[in-house]
């Protein structure tokens, strides 16, 4: 059942930091409770339920094209095997990415980023996580920017990564695209200090699991940036989130978090 919150839907990532009474609820890899993750089915179900946006992952294939896929290897969420970047885009698209979840989704394939953009409203918030370590860390930024340009999805797309070089390249070639810098307190020093932040000039900071820090959040907001944190880092407590003016949360439990947000929206009304 879709959310009945009456507040206007947020359609861009560049709103003023700390300006929302309650954070946006972003569906991690779509509505993965009711559909296989990172598929068109999961993304459309998240939209139907009333999510403020979705998060997805992109990887480069052997022929240097993008596919929406989280893991480095294909086995967990498809009937393919081996690393994604050892297959061509067409080979990856031919795999079944739905049957592992339920026979109902037999034939659901890993989508391209173009397919995702074409399947959802142009003003629906999408957070694209570029999955890359070394090889292709600049190319993936070019490929992602190319697709955002083609769809003119400037305001409703946030492109994020752990890789600061990819984000620096993105800023260099297409500064109009909103950038999210993912970081973890478990990274080795000095990486965990976000030493590359001047290169990235992030619009959003995305602390990994168990990495949210209120003091850092205030510092990010003071610099004009926003924070997308995990719901679990706040014990899924919207009172805590509202108290620090958190801008957005990412969740694996979409319906539950939408229900909780609705309860708090009713209290604030």
Image (cartoon, rainbow, N blue to C red):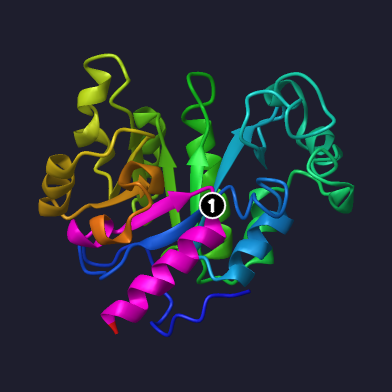
209 lies above or below 107: above
* Magenta-span inclusion, residue 205: no
- Outermost residue toward the top in this view: 188
Residue 229 x, y percent position in the rendering: 34, 46
Name the residue at 35% across, 46% down.
Answer: 235
Which structural element holds mark 1? Answer: loop
147 lies above or below 96: below
* Magenta-span inclusion, residue 262: yes
Q: Magenta part mainly helix, strand or loop?
A: helix
Residue 180 x, y percent position in the rendering: 35, 45
Q: In which quarter of the image is the N terminus?
A: bottom right
State the image quarter where residue 72 is shown: top right
Residue 228 x, y percent position in the rendering: 34, 50
Depth check: 15 or 65 in front? 15
Depth check: 228 or 242 in front? 242
| Numbered circles on residues, count | 1
Can residue 11 be seen in the rendering of this structure? no
Residue bounds of the magenta highlight: 241-268
Task: Report the side of 144 relative to 86 (left or right).
Answer: left
Depth check: 251 or 84 in front? 251
State the image quarter where residue 166 is shown: top left
52 lies above or below 220: below
Name the residue at 42% across, 42% down.
Answer: 160
Q: In which quarter of the image is the C terminus?
A: bottom left
Question: Local crowd at mark 1 within 10 Å, few (<14), some, or many (≥20)?
Answer: some
Name the residue at 49% across, 41% down.
Answer: 129
Task: Report the side of 99 relative to 178 (left or right).
Answer: right
Task: Report the side of 83 relative to 238 (left or right).
Answer: right
The residue that disc 1 covers is 253
Depth check: 169 or 260 in front? 260
């Amino acid at each position: 059942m879709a959310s009945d919150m009456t507040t206007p839907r947020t359609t861009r990532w560049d709103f003023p930091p700390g300006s929302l009474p309650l954070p946006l609820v972003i569906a991690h890899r779509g509505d993965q409770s009711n559909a296989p993750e990172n598929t068109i089915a999961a993304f459309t179900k998240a939209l139907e339920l009333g999510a403020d946006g979705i998060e997805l992952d992109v990887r480069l294939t052997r022929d240097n094209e993008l596919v929406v896929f989280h893991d480095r290897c294909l086995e967990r969420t498809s009937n393919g095997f081996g690393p994604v970047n050892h297959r061509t885009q067409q080979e990856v698209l031919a795999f079944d990415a739905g049957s592992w979840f339920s026979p109902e989704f037999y034939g659901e394939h890993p989508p391209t980023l173009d397919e995702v953009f074409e399947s959802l409203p142009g003003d629906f918030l999408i957070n694209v996580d570029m999955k890359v370590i070394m090889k292709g860390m600049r190319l993936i930024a070019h490929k992602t920017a190319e697709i955002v340009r083609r769809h003119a999805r400037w305001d409703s797309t946030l492109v994020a990564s752990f890789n600061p070089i990819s984000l620096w390249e993105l800023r260099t070639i297409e500064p109009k695209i909103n950038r999210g810098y993912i970081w973890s307190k478990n990274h080795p020093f000095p990486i965990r200090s976000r030493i590359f932040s001047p290169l990235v000039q992030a619009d959003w900071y995305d602390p990994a699991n168990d990495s949210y820090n209120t003091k850092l959040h205030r510092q990010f907001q003071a610099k004009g940036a926003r924070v997308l944190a995990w719901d679990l880092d706040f014990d899924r407590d919207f009172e805590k989130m509202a108290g620090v003016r958190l801008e957005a949360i990412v969740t694996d439990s979409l319906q539950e978090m939408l229900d909780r947000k609705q309860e708090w929206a009713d209290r604030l009304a």
